[in-house]
Image: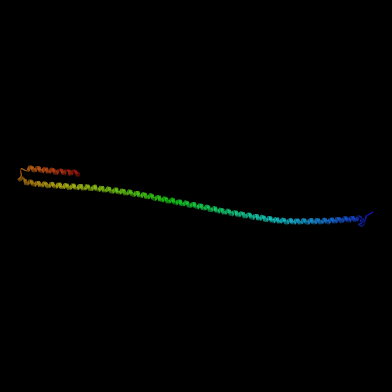
Amino acid sequence: GMSPSRRSWGGGGARLRVRRMRHAIAAEVAARVLSRVYRGHLGRAAAHGVILERAKAEASLLIQRGMRGMHGRMRARHARQARAEDRAAAVLQTGYHGMVGRQRARALREERARQAAALDVQRVTRGWRGRRAYGALVQRREVERAYQGIMAARVQCAWRCRLARDGLIRAVEIAEEEAYLRNLCAVQLQTAARGFVARRVAALRRGAVLPIQALARGWQ
């Protein structure tokens, strides 16, 4: 016989209803599960999208930060390079200006040394020429003085010789006049003394001629 439970459910229809109910419950549970899974999937997808957007935003921020940092480092490096180049240029300019200044100072010192050497050479040359001219002048004056002395001595000698000749000639003339007068006076008074007087006159003439000849030879 049939059990009371099977009789209450109406046999096979009940089982079908139960099966249907189970399928409905399973379908509802499955639908709920599917809905929950789908909502979870949608939530996860939305969360993943949000996370992805956040990651993209953070990545963009990181990229922007990195780019800004890179640009900042590049600007800082360029600024450091520019400062280093400015310092190097300043050092080069300072060195160049110093080199040019030293070259100008050396050229000025060399020019001053050349001018001083030229002045020394000119001073020495002028001194040598002056001493030479002074020596020549002194020598010429000494020669002129010696020549003047010689000429004066010659003039004096000639004048003295002439005075001596004139004196001797005058003395001879006076002696001859005296002898002539004495002869005229003694012709009548002293005939015996003519020979003596003649010899005396001849001796006087010889004595007068010899000094005259000596003076003439000395004058010549």
Could you tell me how many numbered marks the image carries? 0
Q: Quadrant of residue 31?
A: bottom right
Q: Quadrant of the C terminus?
A: top left
Q: Quadrant of the N terminus?
A: bottom right
Q: Residue at x 44, y 51 (%)?
A: 109
Asked where in the image residue 69 lies, by quadrant, the reply is bottom right
- For image coordinates 33% across by 49% down, the residue present is 131
Q: Position of residue 184 (x, y in %)?
A: 7, 46
Residue 202 in picture, x, y percent from top left: 11, 42
Query: What residue is rendered at 17% in x and 43% in y?
Result: 214
Drawn side of residue 173 relative to residue 13, left or right: left
Q: Of all residues shown, which one is farthest toward the front? A: 4
Left or right: 64 as drawn, with respect to 127? right
Q: Give me the residue at 38% from left, 50% from top.
A: 120
Q: How is the image coloured?
A: rainbow
In depth, the one of 210 and 19 nearer the eye is: 19
Residue 30 versus residue 197 in the image, above or below: below
The image position of residue 67, as x and y in percent, is 64, 54
> Which residue is most to the right?
1
Residue 104 or residue 183, whichever sits in front: 104
Q: Position of residue 182 (x, y in %)?
A: 8, 46
- Classify residue 139 as left or right of residue 72: left
